[in-house]
Amino acid sequence: MKARCTWANTPDYETYHDEEWGTPLHGVAAMFERVSLEGFQSGLSWITILRKRPAFRAAFGDFAPAAVAAFTDADVERLMADTGIVRNRAKITATITNAKAVLAMDTPLDELLWSFAPDPPRPPLKNWDDVPAITPESTAMAKALKRRGFAFVGPTTCYALMQATGIVNDHVPPCWRAPAR
């Protein structure tokens, strides 16, 4: 059995941990999906979002920014009635707003988000007590996104995004995915 980060304590989390969390992710739609799902996660358990992710993908057109940006009030009402997703009007409208912001950007979303990777990379963490909730980089990312019109993108949400997409590697020993020391 592989040693994993302690939070990977269910089969769903084990798969997510082993195949996704902390793996470098690129692509505008892929990063838009993660920004959106991290926003929906705010105040909830990630396992809730993870288990609803297929329904989110279906409801939000696989997170294609152009498709989501074209959503109307009727789409908002459709989403509010969709029991497969988190039905929070503020988060739904934020996702639509964020899609419009993605389309208005001069820089591709993934390029902007990766520009906040710590340079040089942060030294490997020793244990979970060393894992921060926010960093100067996540605070700067949140500010940059908000300046571009994004919503539900505070520093904590941005740091979770950085962890999930491999912008930072917060796997800690004895996890098999922890960086070498």
Image: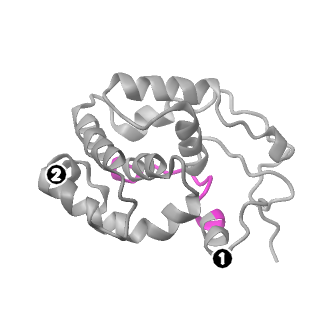
SS assignment at label 1: helix
In percent of the image, x 50 and y 36: which residue is there? 114
Q: Residues in magenta?
A: 17-30
Look at the image and tell me in which quarter the C terminus lies.
top right
Mark before the other along the chain sequence, 1 or 2: 1
**Residue 93 shown left or right of residue 123 in the figure:** left
- Return the x and y of residue 66 as percentages of the image width and height: 19, 48
* 21 inside magenta stretch: yes
Q: Which residue is mark 2?
A: 71
Q: Check disc 1 and give the amino acid type.
A: Pro
The residue lying toward the viewer, choosing from 81 and 170, is 81
**Residue 60 shown left or right of residue 38 in the figure:** left
Q: Which residue is mark 1?
A: 11
Seen in the picture, residue 118 relative to 74 is either above or below; the reply is above
Look at the image and tell me in which quarter the N terminus lies.
bottom right
Mark 1 to mark 2: distance in Å? Answer: 34 Å
Seen in the picture, residue 119 relative to 126 is either above or below; the reply is above
